[in-house]
Image: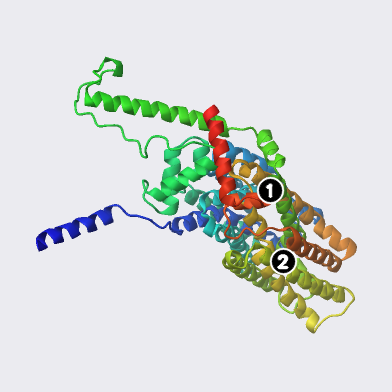
Amino acid sequence: MSMKNSLRSKKISVDQETVPKNLEPSLQNQIIATIICNLGAFATGAAIGWTSPSIGSLKKSGFLTEAEAAWSGGLFPLGGLASVPLFGYIANTKGRKPAAFLAGIPITIGLALKAWGNTSYWLLIGRFLCGLGGGAATALPPLYIGEISEPRARGLLSCFLMIENSLGLFYAYVLGAILPDIDLLPLTLLPLPIIFLLAFWFMPETPIFRLKRGHEEKAARALAWLRKLPLNSKEVKNELTQLATRLGLRLPLPPLPIKRPRRISRRKPQPIYMRSCSSPDSKKEQNFELEKLKAKAATATAKAKNEKSTMEKFKQLISSEAGRRGLGICFALVTTQTFTGMFAVSTYAVYIFETAGSAVSPNACAILYAIVIILGSICGSLLMDKAGRRMMQISSCLIIFICHLAIGFSLKSVANGEKGGILGWLPLIALPVCVFMFNAGAGNMPFVMLSEVFAAEVQDIANTIIMIFIWLTSFVLIQFFPLCASLIGLHNVFYVFAVVAFWSAVYAYFCLIETKGKTLEDILMELSNEKTKNSTEVFYDNLEKKSKDISQV
């Protein structure tokens, strides 16, 4: 009897080991994919940071005129503006991975032109190409991360864009300060986009794009790797079904993976119609062929349903209240991100510290500035899913408002001839605090919300629209920042930045929704002002409508 009980217990333990239940998805591979995806943002940050230590030296040597120096700053966002529509087209038709090459290749060519170009025109062309790649490099992470991440880690992973962009700035600032010849700086930046291209080659395509193209098996494999779960686990199948339902597709197709039955006989197989239906092998072959035909039909249906034109997706986006409100929120957050002046400060950091008459050398201040950006981005990523989006945006904008007032006061005093004492240290204290809070809240917020407030069907077109707006406003800021500083004074420019920060805090208090820990269905319901039903009822109502549409088709 004891022998039987021991054998039975061994059998039960073996069964429990071979059939795991309630597996918990892991974030490890999602974090790896996010870090590698944002290596393009690292290269972009380094390309932006090249301007700060280089422009002054190039102007002093006579290599650049004042007008060319101004355009070297403005051509970068202009290139980003030009790349976003092309990136959106490639990402929507060919995939998120092929679109990454639009980010890496132009940055590589642009840095090579900066390194070996012997005239200012080659440098300006290289600057434009770096912007062309930078626009794609910053458009890729919100789209890619929004489609691979779980809701519990979406806020954390979305902040990696600013973290790695800040690391790129720091890399360029440090090298610009320690290199004996500033002409060597582009050569040290050149490996960065190449590393990004090589590393991202091994990352999976997003499951949502695979489903849009009707490739359920590839979507399941990508999802299983991202969640670090077995391919045929219940968790992978359930999440795949949820993603397909969100896209209006019907699952499952044939079981994953599909394996052709092994033939016992080595003879050349006869066509199905010539075999006996009573043969077991022929029945297996018939079932396989039938499943294959079903898979082809379902793939064609999925492609036809998801291959909408850009204009159709745009109409779908603006026809819904959730889409319009999502666009309005992102436009407001991008306006804050741009016109609080941090992009201009990153580009002209050394110039600002020189004008302020700081007690510390301008290059050392710029390096300190980059370190604070990194710390702020890391703290923001840790606090985003704890404090909430609204609280982070309001608190960061209020502190930015106070810091900009302090910097404006210091610059005005220096312009009036007052120097020394606290005036030399005030920018060194206020600007790092301002940068820290910006990267902890307002700087990250557009990318976080961009990955959260749009339905999967219109995510790509919304991403394209917002990225165009980001680079358009950045071009206006960078191009006219030196002109405005010379016309009205640098201190008045910072007063304008302070007004924008205060307006953004008021807007966030009254209009910004909280998305922390909410599913996409909950967020869309809140944006649509659907308060009479809970999220589960709305989700199943939409599911029923989509199933009726599919049955009619």
In the image, is 340 to the left or to the right of 312?
A: right
Quadrant of the image for the N terminus? bottom left
Amino acid type at image mark 2: Ile
Q: Provide the residue designation for mark 1.
A: 528
Which residue does the image show at 19% across and 60% down from the upper left?
9
Of badges 2 and 1, the one in the foreground is 1
Q: Position of residue 233 (x, y in %)?
A: 37, 49
Q: Position of residue 359 (x, y in %)?
A: 74, 79
Q: Position of residue 471 (x, y in %)?
A: 71, 50
Check disc 2 and report its element: helix, strand or loop.
helix
Is residue 387 shown above or below 12?
A: below
Is residue 283 shown above or below 99?
A: above
Front residue (pair 177, 496): 496
Q: Position of residue 44 (x, y in %)?
A: 62, 55
Q: Provide the residue designation for mark 2.
A: 394
- Whether residue 118 is visible to the viewer of this picture, yes or no, is no
